[in-house]
Each structure stands twice: as structure tokens, then as C-alpha cells.
């Protein structure tokens, strides 16, 4: 009989450990759909050591559940979801200066979340968007709405 693992395994909810096939089965959606979400900028997949394998965290899975609910139950389109995500005031979360705001495409446009832009010449230039509070803290619809209620 195999030894039983008696130690509790603890993994951060932002640690990408789930391969795309597992996430596809967990959510009941196709791998193609997950790749499309990534292409559209709704999610940021982490790449494995060989840069080919997409890995997702528990937070990513929560985000995808929110996206699926918005599409299937609320009948939102992908552009509508992107527009909603673009309203998250990233400049306030990251505490950007006025100068950074003026040089930021996310601050000056609507239609795509901040993590979809190339940030040159501002505070986000050297940030990893997957690790940024804007991406990692707003993984489900309730968190987004709660934040808006506070501002």
C-alpha cells in the first residue's frame, strides 16, 4: 500500500499550477475558448519553464468563472467585459503620479484592461502584470463591485 501524504499542501491562490487541459475540464469549456480569452486580454496565462505550457492559478480560474457567468447568464459580449475591466482605476490602485497617468494608455482610453497595454515610460513599465494588484486582486465580479462601492 502506498504511503499516505500526511502533510498539508499550501499553495497561494495566485500561484500558476494548473495546466490548460485541467482548467478546461474544471470549467467545462474548451481549450480553444481559454486561448481565446487570453488572446482577448481577459486573462494572463503564465508560461511553464519551456514557455509553451500555459499554467493558471486559482485566481485565474475564479476570473474565468466570472467571465463565463457574464457571457452565458448575463449575455455580456467579450468587448463589454473588456470595457468593464478597463474601468478598474488601476492608476489609483498602483498610486500613479499625474505624469504617469498622462503617459499611460490604460488611463487615457477605454475598452481594454490595463494589463493588455505596453507600458513605456510610466510606473508600470517594469511590473509583471500577473503579479500586479490590479490583475491579482480583481479576480471575480464581487471584488470589482466592492471596490467601486468604496470609491
Image (tube, rainbow, N blue to C red):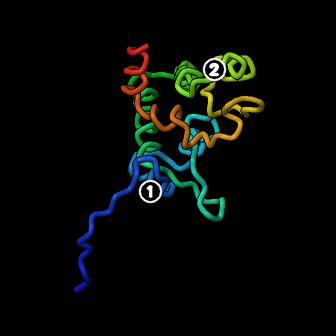
Residue neighbourhood size for the residue with mark 2, other residues' Cα within 10 Å, grouped as few (<14), some (14–19), many (≥20): some
* Mark seen at residue 134: none
- Between the C-alphas of marks 1 and 2, the distance is 30 Å
Q: Is residue 126 left or right of residue 77?
A: right
Neighbourhood count class around disc 1 (C-alpha, 10 Å): few under 14, some 14–19, many 20 upward: some
The percent position of residue 28, horizontal first and vertical second, equals: 40, 46
Q: Residue 100 appears in which quarter of the rendering? A: top right
Of residues 117 and 77, which is closer to you in this image? 117
The residue positioned 42% from the left and 21% from the top of the image is 147
Q: Quadrant of the C terminus?
A: top left
Q: How many marks?
A: 2
Residue at image position (43%, 24%) is 144
Give the labeled residue for mark 1. Answer: 22
Judge whether 122 appears above or below 34 on screen: above
Q: Quadrant of the N terminus?
A: bottom left
Nearer to the camera, 83 or 26: 83
The first of marks 1 and 2 along the sequence is 1
Which residue sits furthest bottom? 1
Mark seen at residue 111: 2
Work out whether residue 80 can be spotted. no
Q: Is residue 99 visible?
A: yes
Residue at the spot 61% in from the left edge and 35% down from the top edge: 41
Q: Position of residue 47 (x, y in %)?
A: 61, 55
Q: Nearer the viewer, mark 1 or mark 2?
A: 2
Q: Secondary structure at mark 1?
A: helix
> Residue 108 placed where, x, y %?
69, 16
Asked if residue 135 lies left or right of residue 61, the reply is right
- Where disc 2 sits, the SS reads loop
Query: At 48% across and 38% down in the image, what residue appears?
Result: 136
The residue nearer to you, when weighing 34 against 145, is 145
Task: Tell me whether circle 1 and circle 2 mark residues in contact (CB < 8 Å).
Answer: no
Amino acid at each position: 500500500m502506498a504511503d499516505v501524504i500526511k502533510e498539508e499542501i499550501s499553495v497561494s491562490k495566485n500561484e500558476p499550477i494548473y495546466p490548460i487541459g485541467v482548467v478546461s475540464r474544471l470549467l467545462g469549456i474548451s481549450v480553444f475558448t481559454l486561448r481565446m480569452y487570453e488572446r482577448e486580454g481577459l486573462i494572463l496565462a503564465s508560461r511553464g519553464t519551456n514557455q509553451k505550457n500555459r499554467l493558471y492559478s486559482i485566481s485565474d480560474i475564479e476570473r474565468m468563472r466570472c467571465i463565463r457567468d457574464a457571457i452565458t447568464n448575463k449575455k455580456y459580449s467579450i468587448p463589454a467585459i473588456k470595457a468593464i475591466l478597463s474601468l478598474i482605476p488601476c492608476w489609483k490602485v498602483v498610486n500613479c503620479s499625474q505624469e504617469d497617468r498622462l503617459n499611460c494608455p490604460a488611463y487615457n482610453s477605454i475598452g481594454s484592461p490595463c494589463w493588455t497595454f505596453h507600458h513605456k515610460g510610466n510606473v508600470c513599465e517594469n511590473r509583471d502584470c500577473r503579479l500586479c494588484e490590479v490583475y491579482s486582486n480583481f479576480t471575480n465580479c464581487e471584488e470589482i463591485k466592492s471596490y467601486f462601492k468604496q470609491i
